[in-house]
Amino acid sequence: MEKRYLFTPGPTPVPPEVLAATAEPMVHHRGADFRVVYERALGRLQDVYRTRGQALLFAASGSGAMDSAVANLTGPGDRVAVVVAGAFGERWVKVCTHYGLDVQRLDYEWGEVPDPAEIGSAVAASGVATVFCTQSETSTGVVSDVQAIKAAVGDARLVVDAVSSLGAVPLETEAWGIDVAVSGSQKALMCPPGLAMAAIADDLWDVLPPSRTFYFDWRATRRAQEAFDSAFTPPVSLIKGLDVALGMILDAGLEAAFERHVRLGRATRAGLKAMGLELFSPDDDSSAVVTAARVPEGIEAPVLLRHLREKHGVTLAPGQGALKPSVFRIGHIGWFDVFDIASALAAVELALTELGADIERGVAVGRAFEAYEQRVAA
Ligand SMILES: *Cc1c(COP(=O)(O)O)cnc(C)c1O
């Protein structure tokens, strides 16, 4: 069997301890065996979110939590604002439009960093009560300053898509006053896909309109979770895995995770630049989740990705939307270390050479290690 390498920003590699937990014999979800795991996992989830508010858990991919946020926070015809700077900002627009909202788009070019002050002025001018944004726009590698966005939108509620950022870059949900932050299991949380979560600020509960979704009803979910029960049959095996993964993250410390992600981003950028490639994502420490780069002239990104997968067993992520022909992405969230980055870079270098690009061989990995070795100033 050929060895396979997964260097995508979701699903991400899953540690063996987590996989082992998901393979344990089944237990009944209303019994004492499961209750212990559920209670611990929910507590750990609050710790990773850095909130004492409720963190709800759903059987869904990350988009399920996004859907739940729109369906629980809004009524038909409500005016909302959405910050759009990539594929996942567009997803907020699609969900909001599906639920019949009047959407004020705050558009940025893909790859541009949204400007909190500009967002604040636009929200003040329109007077919308709810703003949706994306902390880590996985399609471009841009990480927004959601603390500054929350400060800028004043009394408007801020709903943050933290699907690829929770556990990778700082998110002080409670301290920053983030009203809702949604996430998913298959990115920095080092789990298989299938769990979605939403952290909800305490003061929202009294003002929620009736839920427009039955399955993702926040009140019903909260009532069940408060008794360490679940509204429906939960994905028991995934929750066992999540419990172990969150325990690993918290044992090593969130600050250590944030620092590792910054250094992995530096290593990836240094290596790609050493190959002479042009970065698409920002060339600074904010870009700690995924690195997007342009292919050299004359080589199509889908051809590079197919070559990597078929010839070398290496999976990288494609560009999204209009970036598909020209951009590829290397993920470095969750269970990644510098050797993963070295392997990904070495594979890109080899594949590009095989496809006829003029790349200086043997430099990228060295540069990546040099960049990784620099400590991040506290
Ligand atoms: C992965 C991701 C999602 C959710 O995608 P699902 O496929 O539904 O899990 C949402 N937002 C961002 C920024 C993501 O990276």
Image (cartoon, rainbow, N blue to C red):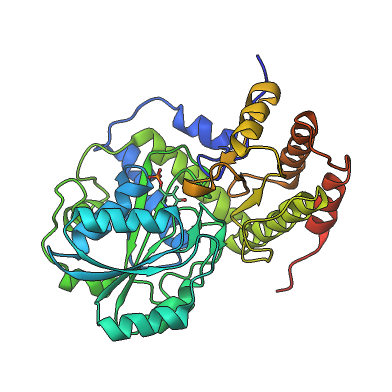
Hey, which quadrant is residue 306 in on the image?
Answer: top right
**Residue at figure coordinates x 24%, y 46% from the top left:** 229
On the image, the x and y values in percent for residue 347 come to 75, 34
Q: Nearer the viewer, residue 298 or 254?
A: 298
Q: Answer above or below: position of 196 versus 130.
A: above
Residue furthest top as drawn: 1
Hey, which quadrant is residue 375 in on the image?
Answer: bottom right
Q: Answer above or below: position of 69 versus 330.
A: below
Q: Nearer the viewer, residue 53 or 129?
A: 129
On the image, the x and y values in percent for residue 332 come to 63, 49
Q: Nearer the viewer, residue 241 or 192?
A: 192
Q: Is residue 157 left or right of residue 169?
A: left
Q: Nearer the viewer, residue 123 or 166?
A: 123
Residue furthest front as drawn: 298
Image quarter in which the N terminus is found: top right
Q: Is residue 226 visible?
A: no
Q: Answer above or below: position of 220 versus 312.
A: below
On the image, the x and y values in percent for residue 369 come to 83, 51
